[in-house]
Amino acid sequence: MGAGYLGRLHGWRFVLFNAVLGLSHIVVLFNAGSYIALLPHVSGDLGGVLPSFLTWAQTDFMVGLALGFPLARYLSGRIGDYRLLIGAFIVYSIASYLCGDSRTLAQFVPARIVQGIAGGITLPIAQSMLLNEYPKRLKAVALTVWGLFSITPFTIGMPVGGYIAYMLGWRFLFYLDFVLTLVIVGTLAALLYGRGFHRRYARFDLVGFLLLAVLLLGLQTLLNMGNDFDWLDSPFLQAIAVVLLIAFPCFIIWELGERHPTLDLRLFLHRNFVIGIISLTLGFFSIQGLLSLLIVQIQLILGYSSKLAGLALLPLVVLSAPIIAVMHYLCKYIDARWLVCFNCLGFAWTFYWIGLYDDPHSYEELFWPMVIEGIFLGSFFTPVTVLTLHGLSGPLMTRAAEVANLLRVAAGAFGITFQGIVLFRRIHFHQLHLADHFGGRQSISYDPLGQLAAKFQAAGLSSGEAQAKLGLVIRQEAAILGLNDAFLVASFIFIGLGVLVWFAHPTHVPIASSPPEDLRMKRAEELLEEVP
């Protein structure tokens, strides 16, 4: 046991603690969402690399977040929540400064990975520390407050990130993180100085953690670099593929034989957990990937500024926050399978609607689908979490929530890369198809290229300028069609998930639970609703 315990905070110290802990949570999650809007700016500033290269920094950051969760559990027992949170935020602040000061991609990506790991450690620890300051009768209130802290960064992340990039430059975001994190560290250290803790000598599954890190980072690297380096024709990617093929069975065998595994594979013996994990990971895989793809491509394809691109996604927040509160209530009385199925079919319809987008000059064509998507985004996590954790109790529920959160965040990183792959492949397909169409190669009697060229020349363009303008139109239209295809693929994924959920056990079957179990369930729900 460490130093003597101090009582709970009261008065202005309690209010300040809530505010600072909320700010710390917002800083970590805000950094995840806002970076996407910065991506075209960062790619031009870090040696002029391709925008696809800069997705590495986002996807590896999210993998780092995922790897931070199992580290948090072990380190919390060894050094205590207070010391761990302070140390993690110090590392986070240093990594933020290094990100802002980076001049090359080779400097930027490792700093983002470290930033992600440190941020991932803070998320469950900060929630635990907040709950410890509330009496038992008010812990549900604490979780409600935590839910507000979790949804706020997602609602403002992309618009504010776009505004910062447009007005102040992308580096300002990371320097702001650096300053805010130091303020957070100083305030928390002053408020909680002298806090004691119960030391827990739990065994850390180092081998399992390292194998998991190799699998996640290796697979992410393979997906990140595949399009740009010709997949397995690259010797480097061949080596990564071999390492993954060896590491995967080793990880499975090791974790099944480990008493305190990093990733408890025995949870997959529960049918609802398996179906819930598939729904959660594939759903977040699609949602995160498409939102990231959309905000970048409307800048690159349609010429939106980063500020306007962020505002284009702002309608998501109109209904998402109120819907979350409603879903917590509905899940108590309605079988979660109905709610998940309705949600998946709603996403399928919305993504199909966006997949029909064909007017680059119409903001309204994006506005209403974003509003509707916000409804289903707000109603997604709670019923899926209830479905996933149904039938689990005690420490098993806590481990299940940790595994689900780790896999969800990692799936979001994979989704960003996967949707980029879909876009990359389909753009070339549509460009070739449109070139054949406009070039008259599909019909001898039909020559739209000549007709359009004549119209451009009549408008005062030379023959060469008319050809260049036509090429630009074809490339833009091919990119829009490729973006549409990514949304259509996601639409079919959600239709499949809507069917899959009916293979789970119904959740309206009464399961005896105590107030502590109810609180543990709510903690798990709030943790899984954190949207990076």
Image: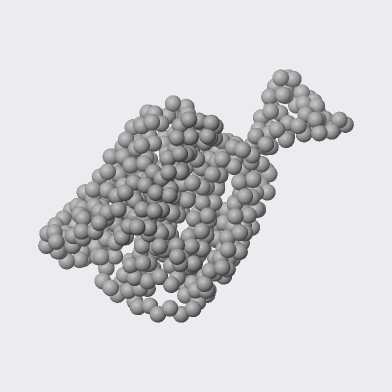
- Residue 298, given in percent of the width and then of the height, sits at 57, 40
Instruction: Give the vertical position of 38 relative to 30 (above or below).
Output: above
Quarter-of-image position of residue 523: bottom left
Q: Most extreme residue toward the right, as rendered?
A: 445
- Residue 272, given in percent of the width and then of the height, sits at 49, 67
Q: Residue, x 73% and y 31% (percent of image)? A: 435
Q: Is residue 415 visible?
A: yes
In which quadrant will I find the N terminus? bottom left
Q: Residue, x 32% and y 57% (percent of image)? A: 258
- Residue 299, given in percent of the width and then of the height, sits at 55, 38
98 or 10, nearer to the observer: 98
Instruction: Give the vertical position of 532 relative to 389 (above or below).
Output: above
486 or 318, nearer to the observer: 486
- Residue 90, given in percent of the width and then of the height, sits at 25, 45
Quarter-of-image position of residue 161: top left
The number of callouts visible is 0
Is residue 119 toward the left or the right of residue 364 in the image? left
218 or 40, nearer to the observer: 218
Is residue 218 toward the left or the right of residue 473 in the image? left
